[in-house]
Image (tube, rainbow, N blue to C red):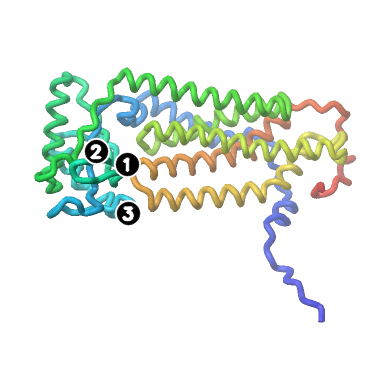
Amino acid sequence: MTKKVNSARFSLDETIASTKFNFTKNFLWFLIPVVAIIIVGVILLSTIGFNLTTDFTGGSIIKIYANYEKTIENAESYNLENSGDFNKLKDEVEKVFAQNNISNVSYQTTTIDIAELGVYHGQAMMIKYQNSKDATYEQILTTNSKLQDEITNALNFSNTPEAVINGGITTPSASNELIVNSFLAIILTMILVAIYMLLRFGVAPACATLLTMFIDILLVASLVLIFRLPLSANIVAGIITIICFSACNNIITFSKIKENQKSGKFDGISNETLANTSIKETLPRSIITTFIAVFCLILLSIIGVGDIRILAIIISLGILSSFYSSIFIATGLWTISFKPKKKIKTDDNAQNLPEKAS
């Protein structure tokens, strides 16, 4: 008995292969929403600037033992791997900072060693906060000592003050060095990717990839400004990750374009037709990998805590941006810039082109 095939079964590959949508035609229209967001970002940068954390502005650090092992009696314990406990401890600490009119504060998990309590690699919260710009070094030390004492009392650590540690002061000069090193790391990553694209695919794909990486960085930076996300050193790591995702998406597309060029089936066919066919062949895989990556990062942003949550959000935005730019912008740039060696056929002569190249 012949098995009946369900003709209504959805196939992503077939749906994309049969679409008449032109991915490269009038690609400048796809730039409009990106440019609009970047313009808003530039306006915000020139007016209110980034929401910088102490990684870039300098500040002080306090580390708090979470007492998860219940080493301290009569004191509440917190499992910082649980977002509820993390936020509960954070709320207690924020009350102290609010009483001292300190607002620029960031929180993240870390580990701590307290020999007096026999604790090694115990759970801890690291708190970074910005010092007053007009305060002297002695005044900063006094404020830090006061905060340390008030947090110790608020958490019932009075009998074990060693559970709240003053982590020291980050100077502005160290912050400036971090800014320079972060900028150099981003530039170096972009240069290395551009060199790789140049050697493997040629000038046009390398230029298109370099420009889309730059667009992705500007777009994510603009979104950081718009949503007032705190800019920390972790965000710089996120931006470098975004560059890598952008490069990978472009490599997939341009690899298929190069493969189709070598196949001989597209000899003389217009750049637009070649690019559209190549996109249709790689788009299902790009959609699936992008969806899986973003889905996992969304889960991480939900269950994560502190800087981990912000980093997950930033990378999610970057992955979506790189997917958009590689499909709608990079290939469009290649279409108008690549000069084929062979004579291009007219669209009438290209009608016999198979819908999907093997």
Q: Please provide percent x and percent y for residue 16.
A: 70, 52
Q: Residue furthest bottom?
A: 1
Sort mark 3 into few (<14), some (14-19) or many (20+) by Cα contacts within 10 Å: few
Q: Is residue 182 above or below residue 116?
A: above
Kind of residue at disc 2? Lys
Residue at 65% across, 33% down: 330
Kind of residue at disc 3? Asn
Which labelled disc corresponds to residue 82?
3
Between label 3 and label 1, give the one nearer the viewer.
1
Residue at 39% across, 43% down: 308
Mark 1 falls on what kind of element? strand
Q: Are marks 1 and 2 in contact (CB under 8 Å)?
A: yes
Asked if one can make out residue 347 in the rendered structure from this viewpoint, the answer is no
Among the two numbered marks 2 and 3 on one chain, the one whose residue lies closer to the N terminus: 2
- Judged left or right of residue 294, residue 337 is right
Q: In this figure, which residue is indicated by the disc labeled 2?
A: 63
Among the two numbered marks 3 and 1 on one chain, the one whose residue lies closer to the N terminus: 3
Q: Please provide percent x and percent y for residue 51.
A: 34, 31
Q: Nearer the viewer, residue 90 or 32?
A: 90
Q: In this figure, which residue is indicated by the disc labeled 1?
A: 110
- Quadrant holding the N terminus: bottom right
Kind of residue at disc 1? Thr
Among the two numbered marks 1 and 2 on one chain, the one whose residue lies closer to the N terminus: 2
Q: Is residue 71 above or below residue 257?
A: below
Choose top left, top right, bottom left or bottom right for residue 336: top right
- Judged left or right of residue 152, residue 314 is right
